Image: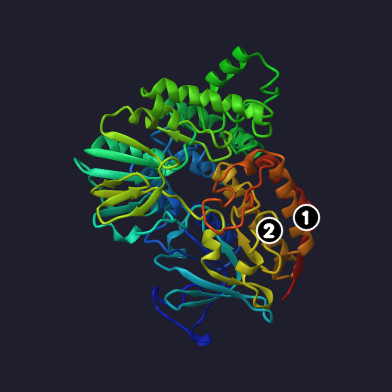
């Protein structure tokens, strides 16, 4: 195989003679990129991972804001490919913090010798497919050029952050922070006047901790979000030992479940049971995990009336916690069905609004008009603050892919192909872009699942497909237009059967002005998706064309 690292990191090279040639190139050294590196190496492919950040870890390198924590339990949100790994690693909490997950990522990289395959501080600018040789030329922002047969985008679904679309964002004279680009050193808010814009997952996690330090905290809420208590706690040795005894069976249950987290399968409609029985059911799963409430009944995500029973249950919980009725109502979502924006898990979020130093501003009543030198102005007044925190989310699913100049056959830009919204075959490949794979891309279960389950499934599918092609003597794997069209239609049809398109969510691209409004994830279920992919592999990959160029 070809030499991976012919030049030191950071060396610019613009001519063909300076181009480094590898068998496979992976963009992104998060959980998916590292596992892809491991699998490609098992196939004997020389592989390099290009990572823009200063360390491995992806999401868990960049997102280190106060309270940053996974919303899937630690023993679920971990690799399953190595039984030895899952037996030797011990977690400390039910829901792992960002530092603990990053330590886990480094442990995995150390254990499997992955560090030497990653080039840090290297951001990809473009990737162009060569029609004549069937290979990709990848160019970094520093001018480095790579020639590769296989190209895998492990760039993450929530990795291109965004700021609010209001004037004056750069004029504020105080300290500014974005939850997706938090400083590596601790930030002290003690006694300061702080504004937080945004109440999605990162805002909901950060606000309680910022409130404990700040002299005065003002939260600017555009859209109220459903959140449930994490009930986080230390993870005992006994609990871990018991799970590890049945880890293999538990992992299989996760792989065949709807969301990648094993929960009892619903058998009844929410509307066919007695209200008291339904309330008791919701109480039994409240605060247990992220998906229990949504998965309680068969029609929770497809019937508006059934969904409203769960939504009102959450609102009741908010009213029980928040002392001021007006504030409780402002915090109670009424503009989207429960679950159609990713629900959150929190540690004291709603109770934070009982603190005398915390104030809530409803931007639906008094919209933001500008950021000023001294703070934030709404249609009603200016709020002077010392620190401004943007918890304003991401250009999800497609943002990182379209930030690069990716061109397939005939030089066609991916941005043109996706002008009306992303199309794909399985969320893995785009027709006309041979040997280009996306891990948990648009059109796959992706963000509607336990990402670890979906990451491993995608990486394994890619590795197996490449191995299958090479065994045939082929070097190029490309989804057909028919397969792409059929899968994209299926993703849309299944999505339209549910309540998800009713929400102005980042699932729909609604948080980015001008972005096509398309439901980008596959809601048919992790288990069903896996079964379909497994059948394709067993049948010799129909819908994929194999060739030598």
Residue 485 position, x and y percent, is 76, 58
- Give the answer, above or below, for where 278 lies relative to 337: above
Query: Which residue is more in the foreground, 100 or 287?
Result: 287
- Give the answer, above or below, for where 300 lies relative to 364: above
Query: Which residue is more in the foreground, 119 or 156?
Result: 156
Other-residue count near label 2 (Cα within 10 Å), few / some / many at <14 / 14–19 / ≥20: many
| Figure quadrant of residue 174 | bottom left
Residue 188 position, x and y percent, is 22, 45
Residue 355 position, x and y percent, is 29, 29
Q: Earlier in the sequence, mark 2 or mark 1?
A: 2
Query: Which residue is more in the foreground, 479 or 109?
Result: 479
Name the quadrant of the N terminus: bottom right
User: Does the rendering let one see residue 537?
Assistant: no
Check the image and tell me how it is coloured.
Answer: rainbow
Name the residue at 71% across, 18% down.
272
Residue 256 position, x and y percent, is 67, 37
Name the residue at 76% across, 52% down.
536
From the viewer's perspective, tell me whether residue 71 is left or right of residue 479: left
Q: Give the farthest residue toward the front.
A: 380
User: Does the rendering let one see residue 338?
Assistant: yes
Query: Which residue is more in the foreground, 213 or 185?
Result: 213
Pointer 2: what residue?
Answer: 424
Cα distance between the residues tagged 2 and 1: 9 Å
Report the number of discs. Answer: 2
Pointer 1: what residue?
Answer: 486
| Figure quadrant of residue 163 | bottom left
Name the quadrant of the C terminus: bottom right
- Give the answer, above or below, for where 298 lies relative to 17: above
From the viewer's perspective, tell me whether residue 303 is left or right of residue 248: right
Circle 2/circle 1 CB separation < 8 Å? no
In what element is the residue under mark 1? helix
């Amino acid at each position: 195989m070809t030499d991976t690292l012919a030049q030191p990191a950071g060396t610019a090279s613009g001519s063909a003679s300076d181009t480094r040639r590898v068998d496979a190139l992976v963009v992104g050294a998060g959980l998916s990129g590292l596992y892809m590196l491991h699998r490609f190496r098992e196939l004997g492919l020389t592989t390099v991972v290009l990572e823009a950040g200063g360390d491995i870890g992806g999401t868990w390198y960049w997102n280190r804001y106060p309270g940053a924590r996974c919303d899937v339990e630690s023993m679920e949100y971990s690799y399953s490919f190595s039984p030895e790994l899952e037996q030797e690693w011990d977690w400390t909490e039910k829901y792992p913090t960002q530092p603990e997950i990053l330590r886990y990522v480094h442990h995995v990289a150390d254990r499997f010798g992955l560090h030497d395959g990653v080039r840090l501080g290297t951001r990809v600018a473009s990737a162009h497919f060569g029609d004549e040789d069937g290979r990709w030329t990848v160019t970094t922002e520093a001018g480095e050029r790579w020639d590769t047969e296989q190209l895998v985008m492990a760039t993450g679904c929530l990795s291109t952050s965004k700021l609010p679309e209001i004037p004056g964002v750069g004029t504020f004279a105080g300290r500014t922070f974005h939850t997706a680009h938090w400083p590596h050193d601790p930030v002290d808010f003690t006694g300061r006047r702080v504004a937080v814009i945004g109440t999605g997952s990162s805002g909901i996690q950060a606000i309680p901790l910022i409130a404990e330090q700040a002299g005065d905290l003002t939260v600017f809420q555009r859209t109220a979000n459903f959140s449930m208590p994490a009930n986080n706690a230390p993870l005992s040795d006994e609990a871990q030992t018991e799970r590890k005894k049945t880890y293999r069976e538990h992992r299989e249950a996760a792989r065949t479940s709807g969301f990648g987290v094993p929960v009892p399968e619903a058998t009844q409609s929410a509307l066919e049971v007695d209200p008291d029985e339904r309330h008791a059911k919701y109480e039994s799963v409240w605060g247990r995990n992220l998906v229990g409430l949504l998965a309680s009944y068969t029609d929770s995500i497809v019937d508006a009336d059934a969904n409203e029973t769960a939504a009102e249950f959450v609102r009741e919980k908010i009213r029980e916690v928040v002392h001021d009725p007006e504030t409780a109502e402002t915090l109670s979502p009424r503009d989207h069905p429960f679950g159609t924006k990713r629900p959150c898990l929190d540690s004291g979020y709603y109770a934070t609004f009982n603190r005398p130093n915390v104030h809530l501003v409803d931007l639906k009543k008094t919209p933001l008009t500008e950021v000023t030198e001294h703070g934030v102005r709404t249609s009603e007044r200016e709020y002077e603050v010392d620190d401004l925190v943007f918890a304003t989310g991401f250009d999800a699913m497609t943002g990182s892919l379209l930030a690069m100049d990716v061109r397939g056959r005939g030089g066609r830009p991916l941005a043109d192909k996706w002008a009306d919204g992303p199309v794909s075959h399985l969320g893995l490949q785009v027709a006309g872009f041979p040997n280009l794979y996306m891990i948990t891309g648009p059109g796959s279960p992706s963000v509607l699942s336990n990402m670890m389950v979906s990451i491993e499934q995608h990486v394994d599918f890619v590795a197996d497909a490449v191995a299958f092609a090479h065994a045939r003597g082929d070097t190029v794997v490309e989804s057909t237009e028919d397969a792409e069209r059929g899968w994209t239609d299926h993703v849309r049809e299944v999505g339209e059967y549910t309540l998800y398109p009713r929400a102005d969510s980042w699932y729909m691209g609604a948080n980015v002005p001008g972005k096509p409004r398309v439901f980008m994830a596959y809601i048919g279920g992790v288990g069903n998706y896996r079964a379909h992919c497994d059948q394709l592999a067993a049948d010799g990959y129909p819908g994929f064309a194999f060739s030598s160029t």
